[in-house]
Amino acid sequence: MVKGIIFDFGFTLFYFDNPSVERYYECFKKGLVKSIDILKEKQIWREEVSNEAFIKKFTKRREHFFRKSIKTKTEFPTSLIFQNVLESLREENIINGIDHIDQHTYDKLAEIYHSCEEDEWEPFENTRETLKTLSEKNIKIALISNHPNHQTIENMLNKHDLAIYFNYIMTSAKYGKRKPDPDIFLFTLEKMGLKNHANSVIVCGDEYADIIGAQRANLQSILLERKYKFPFEKEINISNLRKISNISEILDVIE
Ligand SMILES: [Mg+2]
């Protein structure tokens, strides 16, 4: 009997229309320009200095931390990247006076940076109905997303009135480690109150990190097959891997 389901976010419950690397970059650049506007308002970034210097440094740091996060399974939240970039710009005497910037401001900068993403991700047609049906069957529902800003995930769930269905919402930004590290799954399992029921919990996601993470945490798994392939995707070599192609099919699996 299934007692709980841990869903992934991107391309499991929500989709991003016409995804491409260019589209992602375009979206992040828009957000970054908005974040720089905040820094201008706070007189940290001077109007007369071009945005490009900031964009260049930020992009470089983000790529550095992204590679590091893949390698180490540690998450480096976007707020930390902003902090790192501002500290480095101060060391180079390009800006001064950042001591008064508090965590709340770094969090806000990160939220604004990801705000464009919030307009792009949409729940699949059957997401709400599926979550509703599962919760009516008293199945505990959690979410684990590899995302560098926790608030962005909460905002997207709230925007579509879906947060109500979740017993627990976890992100790599909040936990500090990324899927497939088993610890993020085990921590979430405990928060769901199902610590001693691992074999009655299913992880449903669209990629390697979800399925292999589930396996490492001794949880069941179901792969939601995505319509498009991503570059550099890791293959999942598991025999008898359960697959669905629409989120609502999970209801048949738990019957
Ligand atoms: Mg995904």
Image (tube, helix red, strand yellow):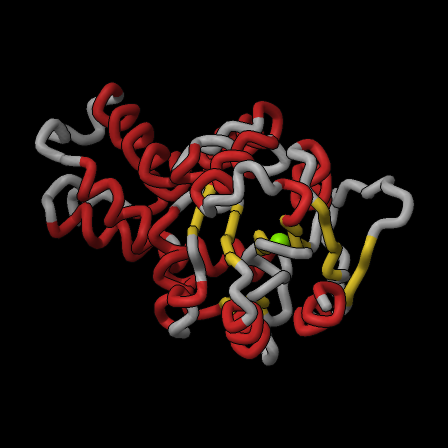
Q: What's the residue at 61%, 25% (across, down)?
A: 71
Q: 85 or 141: which is nearer to us? A: 141
Q: 150 or 138: which is nearer to us? A: 138
Q: Quadrant of ligand 1?
A: bottom right
Q: 49 or 43: which is nearer to us? A: 43
Tally of numbered tags: 0
The image position of residue 221, as x and y in percent, is 72, 49
Q: 99 or 11: which is nearer to us? A: 11
Query: Can I make out residue 61 in this image?
Result: no
- On screen, residue 35 above or below 89: below
Specify the quadrant that holds the N terminus.
bottom right
**Quarter location, residue 130:** bottom right
Specify the quadrant that holds the C terminus.
bottom right
Query: Can I make out residue 176 in this image?
Result: yes
In this rendering, position of residue 53 left or right of residue 186: left
| Residue found farthest to the top | 91
The image position of residue 229, as x and y in percent, is 76, 57
Q: What's the residue at 52%, 48% (across, down)?
A: 144
Q: What's the residue at 51%, 57% (across, down)?
A: 140
- On screen, residue 234 above or below 86: below
Q: What's the residue at 49%, 59% (across, down)?
A: 26
The image position of residue 39, as x and y in percent, is 19, 46
